[in-house]
Image (spheres, rainbow, N blue to C red):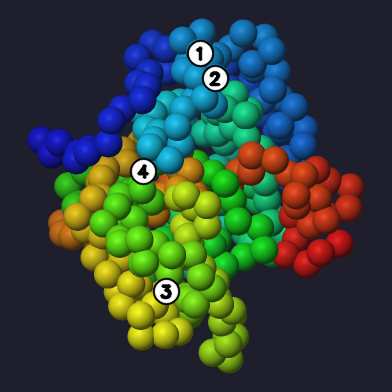
Amino acid sequence: MTIPLCELTIGYEFSDAGRDAFAAALAGVILSPYKFYEPFRRQASAVVDTGGVPEDFLAFCRALRDRDRAQEPVVLVRNAPIDRDVPPFDPDDPVRSKYRLKTTFVAEAFLEVFAALTGVTAIGNIDIAYGDVYNDIYPKRSAWHTHSSKGLLSQPFHKDLGSQPIVPDHIHMLSMRCAPENDVCTSFVRSVDMLRELREDELDLVREPVFFTPADPATSYDTGGVYPSHPILTGTARMRFTQGRTRGRTPEAEAVARRLDEQPGRFRKRVQLMPGDLAAVSNHLSLHAREVHEVRDEEALRTRWIIKSANLDDTGPYRRHLVAGTDYLMSDEVA
């Protein structure tokens, strides 16, 4: 029997009985978040209001609000309620296939409840996956050969949507399907560890807007090679950096960027996210990656599936991006 790798501390683990009772309550959320997000959200809130959430999980979620996020930017929950026995999606169009094949919404309701209990707000982006709040890390045939979220190859350490106008504060990733015999990990490194060994002059330099990050050509529009300058570090630990892609505009900046490339391999924590594992990630205070080391079952890798949501601490600063008539759907264009 293959034992899944886990180098993260487990923050909370559901008992089988607690998971099943919670799943039964969440199964009452019958409206699709992909068609009727706002009524879906109200149904999920009702699960909390009617006592459907285990008391100790309520306490755990509320305690997370007060943790030191820089020191604990990744929280792992195990054995969470999810939808079981969902068939594989069409690899040529997995998103539209999901709309047809996924007819229960336990996982999405769990993510909605978790966001609410931890004091963050799930958002959608009208320019990403049809505006869905819940998106899939799921291989797509046309992207199998890429390092993107829809590829089968390793993905470098990065923060999600770091170059976009709306950068999520938190990424929640809930594993739905993963084969433990494949050595494929989701890996994390804290920003404080990335910065730990920089000299004072290097710390000063990474706060300067003398870096740029070319977009992933597999997932982004061609910009004609024009990329805005940005700092790597703001505040004490908020980073914008993509391993192997962020570059310096001066020799000194380039040298620091290449030094930072080496840090994830030294300080990373790896986990094989098994079905029901939730990784809640502080997006500004850590970087994450997909590491594909050994594949023993290619077909299982092609159906590996994680549901992901983007979340904000406060939607107020992004109010001008809200699509008219909604309080969650964003656009990169200012309204």
Spatial separation of the CA atoms under disc 4 and disc 2:
28 Å
Considering every residue shown, the one lying at the far left of the view is 1
Do the numbered discs 3 and 4 sit on residues whose CB atoms are within 8 Å?
no
Spatial separation of the CA atoms under disc 2 and disc 1:
5 Å
Q: Nearer the viewer, residue 240 or 186?
A: 240
4 or 2: tag closer to the N-terminus: 2
User: Which three-letter amino acid code belongs to the residue tagged 4?
Assistant: Arg
Front tag of 1 and 4: 1
Spatial separation of the CA atoms under disc 3 and disc 2:
36 Å
Task: Say which residue label 2 marks.
Answer: 62
Residue 122 higher or lower than 233, as above or below: above
Considering every residue shown, the one lying at the far right of the view is 325
1 or 4: tag closer to the N-terminus: 1
SS at mark 2 in the image: helix
Residue 126 higher or lower than 146, as above or below: above
1 or 3: tag closer to the N-terminus: 1
User: Which three-letter amino acid code belongs to the residue tagged 2?
Assistant: Arg
Task: Say which residue label 4 marks.
Answer: 177
User: Which three-letter amino acid code belongs to the residue tagged 1?
Assistant: Ala
3 or 2: tag closer to the N-terminus: 2
Dot 2, crowdedness within 10 Å: few (<14), some or many (≥20)?
Answer: some
Task: Say which residue label 3 marks.
Answer: 246
Task: Say which residue label 1 marks.
Answer: 59
Front tag of 1 and 3: 3
User: Which three-letter amino acid code belongs to the residue tagged 3?
Assistant: Thr
